[in-house]
Image (cartoon, rainbow, N blue to C red):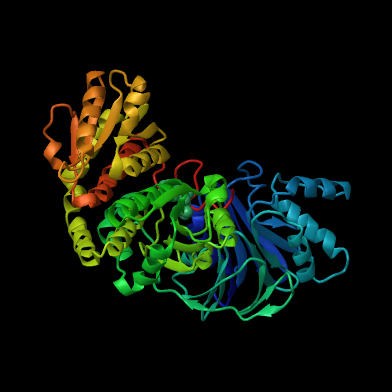
Amino acid sequence: MCGIFGYSGNKNSNDLVFNGLKRLEYRGYDSWGIAVLDGNKIYQYKDIGLVKQNPKLKKLPKSNVGIGHTRWATHGGVTKTNAHPHISTNGDFTLVQNGMVENFDALKRELRKDGYKFESQTDTEVIVKIVERELKKNISFKKALMTAFKRLEGRNTVAVLDAKSNKIYAIKNGSPLVVGIAKDGIYLASDSLSFSPHTKKIIVLDDYDMVEIDGKDYVVSNIKDGKKKKPEIRTLKYQYEDIDKGKYPHFMLKEIVEQQRTILYATDYNEKELEPLVKQIRKSRKVYLLGAGTAGFAAGQIAFFLRTIAKVDAMEIKSYEFKSYLPVISSKDLIIAISQSGETADTIEPLEVFKKEGCKIASIVNMYGTTISRMSDYEYYTNAGPEICVASTKVFTAQSAWGYLLSMTLAGKYKTARSKLKKLTKSLDEMFSKKSFNYIKNKICKTLVDKEHFFILGKGENASIAYEGALKIKEISYKHVEGFSAGELKHGVIALIEKGTPVIGIIPSGEHMDDSKDLISGMEQVKARGALTIGIGASEYSGLEIFDYYISTPQINTLGSIANVIPFQLISYFLSVLLGNNIDKPRNLAKSVTVK
Ligand code: F6R
């Protein structure tokens, strides 16, 4: 995790780096730091907590070159000393890192033997000391940095400000690094979104690429063979000028409401654009959907659509559980990776392995130019725009809707899919009304606020929705919530139900599946044991006495499942507002999990 930002050009780097870090805060928000150059001297400011202005920060000399970092602690607690940048003993260079030095213990012991002392507990300071040791051999700074970098194991990306040469050097391995080419200078960051207001022209660095930035010039080379490269300059489709909350108190609520549009953006593909993937699916032996967390649940939802709508042999694999599938995977299989960030280490690792096995790779990613997209033979984007709240909302429905469109296209029903998707988004209006927000906040969430354990039941098209609903509420409210397939109830789960235990049942329309009957009978059984019952789903069941509360959602065939996740997002949001929690940046979490 962690975010890296750098700038060199003719604008004020202090402000640019500060604003860039604010946009990168979703990657880690326990501490941060900025380093700028004045003449040949480095000045830096570090702080714990959120990226915010401070009189001491304002006192840094104004500069045209600087780097910065937002931290998500891995080695060592949240302190100013552990925050990046980490400056060298003589103050000649300072370094930030994103990733994890897996052999940091061995390297630290080796350095201690050589007499090096450490101020922080971070793995990053180890890199600084190796560079210092290399520099004693009277070699160039660039050579010292490359040699030090080659000693590191794991996924690491570093950016360094070198006072002697006035340059920024950065090397990438595993963790992302993107260069932005603007008229005013060169930007460097963990994602293109953080410098989006300044340029649409980007270079996505490959592993072991080094970029050397000198004023407004840059050179990219590969540190393994030392050769210069002519990297591809891509032009981004969209540029996001302002990333703000608009009229909403939190990004989460803004992103929930945006779903009416983002479901359509994610499915704005014509048949021709989907055709290469459709053909590949047809000739594949089996399709595996890969993802973690919310993306893993979207993988489950898409696999469900592929099986039930398109009759494709599809199943999800949790990214971090891929190893047991290796004995059965074949080069005839297709892997579809699902990811918001496109940089999740848990998902990248299996993709690397499956690619070596000869599998074809497709992906549906929200961010542009990411590692996962670049590894893919078939690259698709959810186009949902920046998702700033750490808890994913609009991207989950975007991923699921894209999976629905793909499945319907495979079934020869592309046009029907597009019209149903339009109908779905129109009918979400009611869910985003004042009346609906009031009901969820003041009736349901006020009842839930004092409860500690909740259970969610779903089945079939709503099984993954129950898991995702539970994750959503857990992440921000910190309540213990579990989602189950309703079929599990009698096999053990019902033992947990006592008087007042909240149970939320997702009830599909009775028209197209039998699952509604099973859900209703499950809810009757928990009600009989004193549960507080909430129904989410088809309006035809809203009047049943077994429900204490009911939220009706539009049921447009199997698309009802996508609508059903929205009340969970709203419960999560309003419950957490009542609890006074940090909505957009929940504790211990980061938006992009780039370490294992
Ligand atoms: C939860 C959430 C996470 C991510 C997971 C994978 O709200 O966002 O569970 O879904 O960390 O991240 P991506 O989608 O970036 O691969």
Regarding residue 188, the answer to whether it shows in the image is: yes
Rendered position, 499 above or below 212: above
> Residue 391 in the image: x percent, y percent?
41, 47
Q: Is residue 510 left or right of residue 272?
A: left
Measuring 26% from the left and 47% from the top, which residue is drawn there? 561
Q: Nearer the viewer, residue 498 or 28?
A: 498
Q: Residue at x 31, y 18 (%)?
A: 498
Q: Is residue 503 left or right of residue 4?
A: left
Q: Is residue 514 above or below residue 547?
A: below
Residue 92 appears in which quarter of the rendering?
bottom right
- Residue 523 higher or lower than 251, as above or below: above
Find residue 584 and report its horizontal and vertical position in percent: 41, 48
Give whichever of 412, 224 is nearer the camera. Answer: 412
Image coords of residue 314 (percent x, y)? 40, 52
129 or 32, which lies in front? 129
Q: Decide if residue 58 is on the left or right side of residue 390.
A: right
Q: Is residue 2 visible?
A: no
